[in-house]
Amino acid sequence: MREFLKSLLHPYYLAGFITWAAVVSMSSSAPLSLALLLIWLAAFFATPLGEKNERILWALMCVEAACIVALPLFVQHPSSSAVLMVVFAAQLAMALPIRIAAAIALLLTCIYFAALSLRVEKIPIPMMLSFGGFQIFAVITAHYARTAELATQQLAQVNADLLATRALLESTTRHGERLRVSRDLHDVVGHKLTALRLNLRALAGNIDDPSLRLSESLTAEVLSDIRNVVSALRDSDGIDMETALRAMSRAFPRPSLQLKIAPGTVVDDPALSEVILRVCQEAMSNAAKHGVAENIFVALNSSSLIIEDDGQVTMPLNEGNGLHGIRERVQAVGGHVEFGRSTRGGLHIAVTFQ
């Protein structure tokens, strides 16, 4: 409901209301004409409810079209309601491909003026053509506005995806470099220092020289220090998942990411870190598109990943391409995933790793 109220503040609905008010001002106070106008306005403002249900959207738009066609029969100025067709044409372009929207808009124009012919003796052809042109213009304008909005959203997601991937790559590179340095210290420097210490100990056993015993002692201390450094390098915090996940979430104006990583959680495997990132990304995208969620809650520890949102999910759950992709990614690293409904009403994703 909160998201529905926000959508009504869009300039598109303000423009539609002003257009409706202009038609009301030119119409008579006949109860039937006012009823048709009020029904059209209610259906117009209810269209955001159809974003999650295509049947509801089509039903509302059919109601709008029926009201528009019926209005010429009852309003005081029969042609005054024709401007509502322009608003309706823009709605069509926001929901349908441009060619289909244009065809429906032109068909509605023909039906409208056919109804208008019952009230007037002669249909002004220039007026009919002008309204047809207005509707095509509205369809084209709304189509490109919708295309630009979708392109902006996709660009923001791609940019955030790149930022998240870069953060993940930097963390993975640092983690890999630490392991490489620790192996080199252990395998090369450590072995040579061990050999040097053994040789010094052998010499000190044959020659009673304090400097040899001191050198052997210093070599032992250096070897111990190197072992401590190697242990410290290996005992890293793993790949920085928090930075990568927060970078990914910036692409979504909603839902807001509520991230909780358990203390001591270490992700060392780059393939596993990639799966965690992509699962969270798909969950956020799914919550934004279908669940209309305001928040998404991600809890990560060394053996599991739990994701929940506060949107609305319909059960039984129909696994589309997004959820199927999550299952495939998790299974590819030997994990297991379960989908369900959370206590908040949204989607619940439980991933366990081996």
Image (spheres, rainbow, N blue to C red):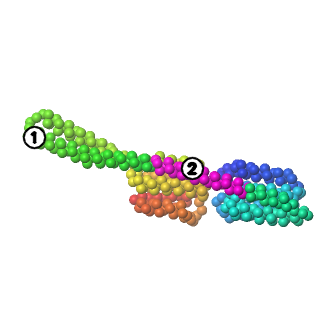
Crowdedness of circle 2 by 10 Å Cα count: few (<14), some, many (20+)?
Answer: some
> Residue 304 appears at what percent x and percent y?
44, 55
Q: Is residue 143 magenta?
A: yes
Left or right of 281: which side holds 98?
A: right
Which residue: 52% across, 54% down? 281
Given the image, on which type of amino acid does mark 1 rest?
Gly
Which residue: 16% across, 44% down? 198
Residue placed furthest toward the right: 121
Left or right of 47: which side holds 267?
A: left
Which residue: 84% across, 66% down? 114
Q: Of callouts 2 and 1, which one flags the residue occurring earlier in the amino acid sequence?
A: 2
State the SS at label 2. helix
Given the image, on which type of amino acid does mark 2 rest?
Ala
Crowdedness of circle 1 by 10 Å Cα count: few (<14), some, many (20+)?
Answer: few
Q: Is residue 30 magenta?
A: no
Label 1 sits on residue: 205
Viewer can see residue 31: no
Disc 2, disc 1: CB below 8 Å?
no
Query: Residue 156, which numbered label?
Result: 2
Instruction: Choose between 339 and 239: the one closer to the eye.
Output: 239
State the SS at label 1. helix
Which image quarter: residue 71?
bottom right
> Residue 286 appears at what percent x and percent y?
56, 57
> Residue 313 appears at what percent x and percent y?
59, 60
What residue range appears in magenta?
138-167
Instruction: Choose between 121 and 49: the one closer to the eye.
Output: 121
